[in-house]
Amino acid sequence: MHLTFHWSGTLRRSRLRTVSSGDEQAESRRTWKRFPYGDRIYRYGGTALQSNWSRLHRGDREPYPSVDSLDALLRANPALAPSVPSAEVLVPILEDAWRAYHAGDFADAVDRGLAAGPVGLVVSARAAAVYASHLEEDETRRIAILRGVVESCSALVQLAPNWANAWYVYGLALGRFSQNISVVRALSQGLGSKVRDSLQRAVELEPSHADAHVGLGVYHAEVIDKVGALMAAITYGARRTAVTEHFETARQLHPQSPVVLAEYARSTVLAFGNLHQGRAHQIFGEAAACQPADALERLDGLFGRNGLAVFLEAFAGSSLCRRRGVRAIGANPRSNQAAKARHAGADHDDVSCGRQLLIGRNRVNRGGHSPFSFSYRPGRRSMRCTGPTTGSSKRSVAE
């Protein structure tokens, strides 16, 4: 079975190979947008990666690359063995791939992960999925990247059916791909059940996999948002209670994670709409206050800060806001929390986050859904929020 990412056009990548040459890696970096917050802030050189590994991988429970961990992986998944001629050779390649991933050098992480063969596909797939979801502005290229990741991970889970993170990245890639082609279309193609089953398999293999619980919570919320709570429950088994259960489990397993909290806040609005607006506001605030440990957490922390800033602005004059006690925070320009939220949103966002912040998209004043539409689009230096009483307001992020 031939594992490779199938890039197209300017996003083409090489097949599985030895470590890329400097020229090839330079070309990759020119093709993909670089992580926008500096080159050194999340670099874990030397022993720093191992020292911080438990914090960095509390969400996915990935073991630190070592001869022992590779041996355990091969014993659980014998079909991987022919692709691992020497664990001692692959360990430093995997370490460097994860260093690049955490630093936000996503193109480099893909190249280095592919150089390690199938055992490096988890880090390669994660890097490609994060880049596509957060930084790639062109929709066609974004979908092409995610499609390639889905195809590669589909092959990987056949080779390594007992590898929790192989199933997780497969579910992650399927979920991101579904969001980009539209969830409704993905459901009609049967991708929803593949997302759910892949993430459930990851949880079966690793019950403490917080990131898989996040993915399951997002799955339930997205389906409810798109087809309604009743149809979601009957046709797809998606339930509001499952959204809360999975995210609360993820929160217990990985507290103070901006990734968990940002997705929790967004999914709360998608699944509960008007019922839990105050709760979503609170969780957005918690996500905004988290200290990121790597590039992905920085990007999701930005997602949470922007979500809180726009949330406060949209609700500042609404009757719903006044009923839920949010007005005292959002409407008062001297409020510390409002000021911090606005400052944080403005501070980071001359960079194209690349990820749409969509809460209740096209769900204006429909029962059970959010009456607000928030959008933050890549390549634009503003966010727009529309509410039932505030009308449309556009806030420049450079304010």
Image (cartoon, rainbow, N blue to C red):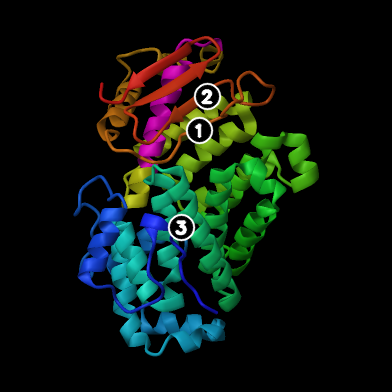
Q: Earlier in the sequence, mark 2 or mark 1?
A: 1
Instruction: Determine which residue is flagged by label 2.
Output: 373
* Amino acid type for the residue under numbered disc 1: Leu
Instruction: Determine which residue is flagged by label 1.
Output: 358
How far apart, in angstroms, are the residues tagged by discs 1 and 3? 24 Å
For label 3, the SS is: loop
For label 1, the SS is: loop
What label sits on residue 114 in the rendered view? Answer: none
Residue 203 in sight: yes
Instruction: Determine which residue is flagged by label 3.
Output: 59
The quadrant of the image that shows the N terminus is bottom right
For label 2, the SS is: strand
In the displayed structure, 166 sits above or below 116; it is above
Q: Residue at x 43, y 61 (%)?
A: 7
**Magenta range:** 300-319
Residue 206 location in percent, x, y?
56, 66
